[in-house]
Structures are given as C-alpha cells and as structure tokens.
C-alpha cells in the first residue's frame, strides 16, 4: 500500500426503512480537518484523471455505481515511490479511501451506471488558485493502463 493511503471499511446499518452508512468521523485516527464536501460523477467507461494536490488530502466514498480508483506514488522521498494501487469503490464495496497530498489519482466508471463518489477534502477549493495539478490520463509516464482487464 502506498505510504499515507488508508482504507476504512464502512459499516452499513440497514433496517426496514432503508439504511445508514457513516463515512468520515472527526474521531477517525486519520481525520485532519474539514474543507468541504462535494460529489463527483464518472460516466460508465470514462476515465477522470490523473491529478494530484500539493496541500489537500482527499477522502473518497463511492455511494452509487462502481468506480475503479487508481493511485500512483510519484513523491520523490516516499518509501513507496513508483507504486500503483487499484481500488474498487461503490455499492459493492463500501469503503472510505484516504488519498494523501502529492499522490496522483484518477478514476474510471465501471459497470452500466454512473459512479457517484463523495469527497470530503481537507481544504476548500480555491477558485483563483486551485490546488489541482493535472496529468493526461493516457499520455504519461505512469505505469498503468486504464483498459478493462478481462479474463
């Protein structure tokens, strides 16, 4: 696992009315601070990525559909530099994924419906000076192929 990445298995509490699922708590050992909450959607088969943040830690939870979220550690002084981690988030795997600053990440909607991911980053989005640095999803030096892996 890439240094600083955390996966928290989420507890789903169902009853006859529906269900409840806690995602992020201020007493989680990895909790730092609250910036904002937003929803991002990946259409089936679409890759959104790569990008990274210099200050922000992301907290992804897939709440509908399924997404393949891939991380690449390109940090110069990291003990896991060059490592790739692949995660499947969504209805079939209710987890919270913590993505530290400077770790490149992207997602691909998988299955037949849109993947909805809630993110609770540590920082507010700064419209005038965004903490977001993009890398082309296919034309890059990252050792990862977004194609489906049949077999």
Image: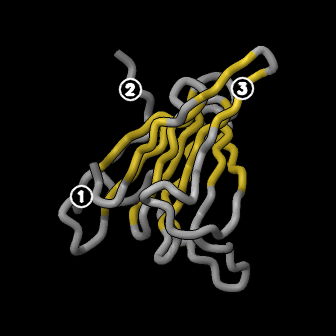
Q: Which residue is mark 1?
A: 82
- Residue 76 shown left or right of residue 111 in the figure: left
| Mark 2 surroundings: few (<14), some (14-19) or many (≥20) residues within 10 A | few
Q: Residue at x 37, y 54 (%)?
A: 5
Q: Which residue is mark 2?
A: 149
The quarter of the displayed image where residue 20 is located: top right
In the rendered image, residue 7, in percent from the top left (x then y), is placed at 41, 44
Q: Secondary structure at mark 3?
A: strand
Calculate the distance from the C-alpha at mark 2 to the C-alpha at mark 3. 33 Å
In the rendered image, residue 11, in percent from the top left (x then y), is placed at 55, 32
**Camera-side residue of 38 and 44:** 38
- Which-is-in-front pick, marks 2 and 1? 1
Q: Which residue is mark 3?
A: 19
Q: Residue at x 64, y 29 (%)?
A: 65
Q: Are marks 3 and 1 in contact (CB under 8 Å)?
A: no
Which sits earlier in the primary sequence, circle 2 or circle 1?
1
The quarter of the displayed image where residue 63 is located: top right
**Camera-side residue of 73 and 20:** 20
């Amino acid at each position: 696992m890439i240094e600083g990445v955390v996966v928290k298995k989420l507890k789903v509490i169902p009853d006859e009315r529906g269900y409840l699922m806690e995602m992020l708590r201020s007493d989680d050992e990895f909790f730092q601070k609250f910036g904002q909450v937003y929803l991002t959607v990946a259409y089936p088969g679409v890759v959104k990525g790569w990008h990274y943040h210099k200050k922000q830690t992301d907290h992804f939870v897939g709440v509908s559909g399924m997404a393949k979220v891939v991380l690449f550690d390109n940090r110069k002084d990291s003990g896991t530099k060059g490592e790739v981690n692949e995660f499947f988030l969504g209805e079939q795997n209710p987890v919270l994924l913590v993505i530290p600053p400077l770790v490149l990440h992207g997602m691909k909607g998988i299955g037949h419906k849109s993947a909805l991911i809630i993110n609770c980053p540590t920082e507010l989005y700064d419209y005038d000076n965004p903490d977001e640095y993009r890398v082309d999803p296919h034309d890059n030096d990252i050792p990862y192929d977004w194609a489906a892996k049949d077999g």
